[in-house]
Image (cartoon, grey):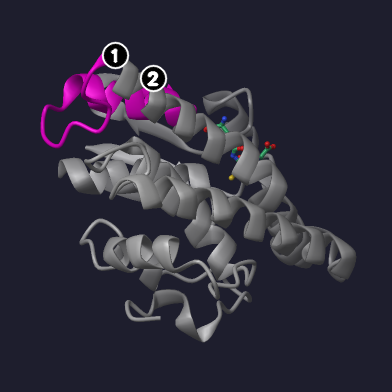
Amino acid sequence: MWQLHQFALCPFSRKVRLLLGEKGVGCELVREYPWEQRDEFLDMNPAGQVPVMTDAARSLRLMDSMAICEYLEETVDKNAMISGTAVNRAEIRRLVAWFDTQFFADIVAPLLHERMEKRIVTKAPPDSNKLRAAMKAAVRHLEYTDFLLDRHNWMAGATMSLADLAAAAQISVADYLGGIDWKHHEQTAKWYRGFKSRPSFRPLLSERMEGIVPPKHYDDVDF
Ligand SMILES: N[C@@H](CCC(=O)N[C@@H](CS)C(=O)NCC(=O)O)C(=O)O
């Protein structure tokens, strides 16, 4: 049985969880807070980052969300998420990298730092200028996803792909942390409403991070 070492608001772990759900692969969740820097966890992943996916019975240990997703894609046929022509697959990988690096750096990382890490680790208040900058960046990013979704039903083309899972993972954490103003983003909101009702997404939306309450619309499918 796979075990996924992760925490509720890690967008990279969410992407892996969504892929596991879409592919119907069972997995036990093990909560790991990387900021605790536990020796046992650093022995497991010297980078000190979640997600890490292990299967003790088979002595398997996978880390880095993209490496884990590529492994699942290569070993589980059901619901291929990096498929189509070489050009299609390149576009899927480009957009996964876009959400995992740009969207994360501009929006999710500052929100996690200001609203979660400061609260849990340093007990300092959030910096309102940094929160405002992240929300402003979210407007720009959602304008881009509106543009992508104007051209086709899914982020990278006509079918759902890993790009949609990466986008939903990052957007859902930003939304939990109050970083998204959905006004004027009808294309992205429509796509996200559809995503919210998927069985792979429901368990993530019902989870809460201790001490951090999401906005009311967060798990509402008809927000
Ligand atoms: N490239 C890595 C990034 C993972 C990552 O940044 N995880 C964060 C939590 S969301 C983490 O563990 N941060 C702790 C640290 O960097 O020390 C991946 O895709 O798995």
Left or right position of 21 against 142: left
Q: With respect to residue 175, does 141 lie above or below?
A: above
Task: Write the start and end of the magenta stretch as one range.
Answer: 60-85
| Residue situated in front as seen by the camera: 206 or 90 | 90
Q: Where is residue 53 shown, x and y percent of the image? A: 38, 33
- Position of the N terminus, as image quadrant, is top left
Determine the residue positioned at 84% across, 68% down.
Answer: 126
Q: Where is residue 158 shown, x and y percent of the image? A: 23, 40
Residue 120: which numbered mark, if any?
Answer: none
Instruction: From the image, tell me which residue sits under label 1.
Output: 86
Callout count: 2
Determine the residue positioned at 53% across, 72% down.
Answer: 182
Q: Quadrant of residue 130?
A: bottom right
Residue 90: which numbered mark, if any?
Answer: 2
Q: Quadrant of residue 134?
A: bottom right
Left or right position of 75 against 16: left
Q: Is residue 130 magenta?
A: no
**What amino acid does circle 1 point to?**
Ala
Q: With respect to residue 187, does 78 lie above or below?
A: above
Could you classify mark 2 by the number of other residues whose Cα lies within 10 Å: few (under 14), some (14-19), or many (20 or more)? some
Q: Where is residue 47 shown, x and y percent of the image? A: 63, 25
Does the numbered disc 2 mark a residue whose Cβ is under 8 Å from ligand 1? Answer: no
Circle 1/circle 2 CB separation < 8 Å = yes
Q: Where does ligand 1 appear, by image quarter? A: top right
Furthest toward the front, the residue is 151
Q: With respect to residue 166, does 68 lie above or below?
A: above
- Look at the numbered disc 2 and give the secondary structure of its residue: helix
The answer for how far apart the CA atoms under marks 1 and 2 are is 6 Å
